[in-house]
Image (cartoon, helix red, strand yellow):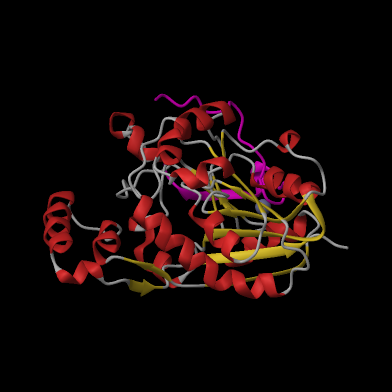
Amino acid sequence: MKHEPIAAARACPLCGAGADQAEPFLSDTRDESRVNQSSFASRKIPEYMSHAMVRCRVCDLAYVDRPPSVASLAASYHEADYDSAEEAEDAADAYAWPLRTVLDLLKGRDRALEIGTGTGAFLERLKSEGFTQLIGIEPSSAAIAAAPSHRLPWIREGIFEEANFPPESFDLICCFMTLEHVQDPGALVAAAHRLLKPGGVFVGVTHDRRAWLNRLLGHRSPIVDIEHMQLFSAASARELLRHHGYNAVDGTSFRNSYRPSYWLRLVPMPDSLKRTLTRWLRKSWLDRQRLSINVGNYMSWGFKPL
Ligand SMILES: [Zn+2]
């Protein structure tokens, strides 16, 4: 798919600082001949391609200053492949652990919304935590097709639109590994704020580009990706919430647990060697284990004032 970027450089999507406050961060390494339906799939093998990005000197956000249009992004995710339903369950377990701290502070456990729900794996965890009404939004029809049938009544296909929900109607809104992918993360968290009941909480998971592993890997980090319209640090992820009126903003890093053959996907090495090693690992007893690693993922949250 061809992406038509917007014509003029945009302001920082976190703090609004103009292009004069931006410095170069990543160069444009896209190769249209290598962009396909798996480029927009969850947990794909990294392609190490990215749009050109700049860094905001004011708030430290790294962002694509000439992103594709919202319609073009929506089309890319709608058509994306999906082949990681098993890893989605592992990811949901990883998010459920740090989320317990947040839930302890939350009054109600009635309605929950997940923006970018995939197969609805995390909604299942929220059900176990006592939430009674679950809604997940997911643009990829392949992801929804991979969801177990009992979760389908919870999942709505499409992109998140505030107008589809009554204001002040949710206790919890979460958005995991999606804030980097949308064109305007500020608009998303502001809309979520309006949809939360007073005292309700927004919870996000983003990559922390300043985490040690991402700094170590540099341009070979899997976070350098054509899907990412912005890259947060832990501080800028919290700042996004403060900037849009959230209270008691906090966050934590956490570990992800996956099969060794999944982790291998993310290691920079020649693709042919990676495929050989993956085939070997998949057949071995090692791959029935789960390996927990802090790869620089960061959970941030903020409450709507009472
Ligand atoms: Zn900024």
Q: Nearer the viewer, residue 103 or 295?
A: 103
> Does residue 37 belong to the magenta stretch?
no
**55 left or right, relative to 200:** left
- The answer to whether residue 113 is above or below residue 286 is above
Q: Is residue 22 visible?
A: yes
Residue drawn at the location 51% of the way across and 63% of the way down = 208
The image quadrant of residue 142 is top left
Secondary structure character of the magenta stretch overall = loop
Q: Is residue 233 visible?
A: no
Residue closest to the eye, 14 or 135:
135
Q: On screen, 106 above or below 277?
A: below
Range of magenta residues: 1-28
Q: Residue at x 33, y 30 (%)?
A: 32
The residue under the point 80% across, 40% down is 166
Above/below status of 269 relative to 178: below
Write the residue at 46% across / 39% down. Answer: 144
